[in-house]
Amino acid sequence: MSDIEKKMNEEYKWGFETNIEMEEFPKGLNEDIVRLISQKNNEPEWLLDYRLKSYRLWLTMKHPNWQYCDVPEIDFQDLYYYAKPKSNIKPASLDELDPELLKTFEKLGIPLQEQKRITGVAVDVVFDSVSLGTTWKKDLEKVGVIFSSISEAIVSHPELVKKYLGTVVPAADNFYAALNSAVFTDGSFVYIPKGVTCPMDLSTYFRINAKETGQFERTLIIAEEGSFVNYLEGCTAPQRDENQLHAAIVELIALDNAEIKYSTVQNWYAGDKNGIGGIYNFVTKRGICEGINSKISWTQVEAGSAITWKYPSCILKGDNSEGAFYSVALTNNKMKADTGTKMIHIGKNTKSTIISKGISAEESEGVYRGEVKIMPSAHNARNYSQCDSMLIGDRCQANTFPYIDVKNSTATVEHEASTSKISADQMFYLQSRGIDPEKAISLIVNGFCKDVFKTLPLEFSVEAVKLIEMKLENSVG
Amino acid sequence: MLEVKKVHAKVAEGIEILKGINFSVKPGEVHAIMGPNGSGKSTLSKVIAGHPEYEVTEGSVELSINGTMTNIEDLEASDRAREGIFLGFQYPVEIPGITNINFMHESFNALCEHQGADTMSDDDFRTYVKSKLPILEMSEDFLDRPVNEGFSGGEKKKNEILQMLLLNPRLALLDETDSGLDIDALKTVANGVNKLRNKFNSIVLVTHYQRLLDYIKPDFVHVLHNGQIIKTGDSSLALELEEKGYDWLTGDHK
């Protein structure tokens, strides 16, 4: 028993806080704050204009209310929109970062110092509103790959940012897209030049630390003709009683014959077992397969946040282009996750695959919401969707809302769905073979999620399995 | 090996099913528990294996652990399995997404770890499993299919006995292992069970019919009726039951 109690107390082991002096803008949002953010980043005029336009647009928009779960009203004037560690005056090397920050990331399993770095993966670390730096940058530059914070890219490669920013997710797309376009502070920028296979995986680690601060990150990935990149994203936040807002935009652009693989393990603090605290994770992620034969795949393991509201999508514009969405969304306690994807088929012979696995435990709610749209131009488009839900216990909920809109009669669209429950008989069967209850649940759940986990890079998939096991540790009824 | 003392048990918050069961099993012995439907046979095997839905309200189940008879009421099902109890199910459950061999490997390694033996690598384990397949006339493709999914009734039962042979339990409880088997499969399964038989291992067969006992000769036969053992004898008792039916003992004349 004491073991389980111990585990319950360390349920969210990333919940610690970093005590560091922060520089914050005053609370609340107005045009001056937008100007200040732009000024802090030394942004060109056009970007300030973009921000201000977005801000004015946002003022005219209403908070959406179509989602399945209730979102408590958010007071947008009661948030900080910019917070950064005071000590961080862009050190020349990550080794010179504030030792408190180095310690923080070391604790999160991401050593930043030169000699301790993880080989084979370049990491950009974002702490509250700013990027602290990027590892392996110089090595990547040798092959022409640009991997930096977006604030840096705005200054060093303004032409690329200007050409693509907001082209996949325009500010007018939705309420939070407009808000993000006005106040985004940092995020990652990736540019893979023509014909280059990125020599290592690229990864961004997002950490929310400051109190009452919204994190508005912006990520832009451009894969030129014939290039390939594998991008990974991880996120954690301290354990706090108040809710915090995370409203990101991620845009992916794949040109002719290019391929982008984007994987996320989202483990923001989810609130306690009574539903107090946790992150509101309202994210717009979308990629466009602009060129012929291009490919974009989204893999996500959503295991955190009090409320998740997220639909990584693909616009399949280029002929023969392919989009994929592989998702495991796990909710426990009182978490709510409304997540899924949109696959918009425009080009000929475009193909999309959707595999969604929802696991709900305790009093949580999981929703799959997806749309498959075949436009009149999309001859011979194909889609395959599979949405499975697994319930643990009898107080949770799973819902599936698939929308299918076919405007071309040559299309093939398949949809399969299932709902299952871990039965007491399955549990007893495994236990009678010497497998303990926690391992038994994890075997069943991992079996259920296998099709998604196998699309993750190896280390990420090991991490995902561990994360799911840990989250479910106390859900055994 | 096993000592069942005055055990009363019920389904949590339900009616009492076992009403004072007494019997003991020594190493190397084979016992058969027979009885009409609803007599409590399956409950008895689940109670010994530690099914969480059953509650022992009186009496005790003791197992020899490291040479000492120990009350196992506080041991969960998984711990009992690690101490050498194996339950062969009447209706083995399907578990999608986990391959049979992966499941058996997890189980095997869990037992090895507990018993302080070396765990096996994937390759070694597969070789080990393959060595047991011919006994049950099973083909290798069963190993890579999800646990029991789409298996016929007979295949499920063979799969149970395969697991038993892999885990080499000190005490095997086999619940209606013969039900739903044709005569050839029955012989194969019985042959598998006999492979476990030696002077260290004990076997408890729970069965409605005598026919399994033609192939696995028990040392003792217990007749269970209405939650109690009403008669104990040697293997000839089973033949007598076959001939006269249960009414002869239970006094239920129709």
Image (cartoon, coloured by chain):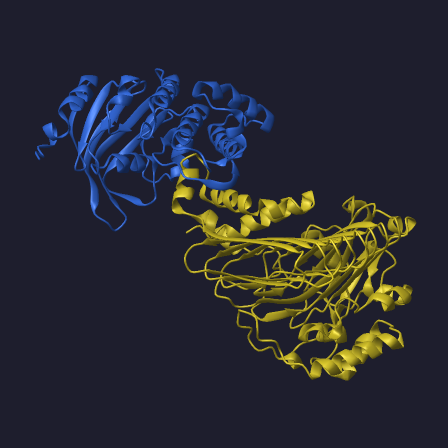
Chain colours: A yellow, B blue
Residue occupying image coordinates x 83% and y 73%: A40
Relative height, residue A254 to residue A461 (above, below): below
Name the residue at the top extreme: B199
Q: How many marks?
A: 0
Query: Percent position (x, y) of residue A120?
Result: 78, 44
Q: Nearer the viewer, residue A116 or B31?
A: B31
Q: Nearer the viewer, residue A446 or B158?
A: B158
Q: Nearer the viewer, residue A155 or A251?
A: A251
On the rendered structure, is B176 left or right of A106? left
On the rendered structure, is B178 left or right of A449? left
On the rendered structure, is A12 left or right of B38? right
Determine the image quadrant of residue A43.
bottom right
Query: Percent position (x, y) of residue A475?
Result: 46, 53
Decide if residue B254 is in sight here: yes
Residue occupying image coordinates x 89% and y 74%: A44
Relative height, residue B74 to residue B1 (above, below): below
Decide if residue A24 is in sight here: no
Query: Percent position (x, y) of residue B199?
Result: 34, 15
Q: Nearer the viewer, residue B90 or B232?
A: B90
Name the residue at the front extreme: A409
Residue occupying image coordinates x 34% and y 22%: B186
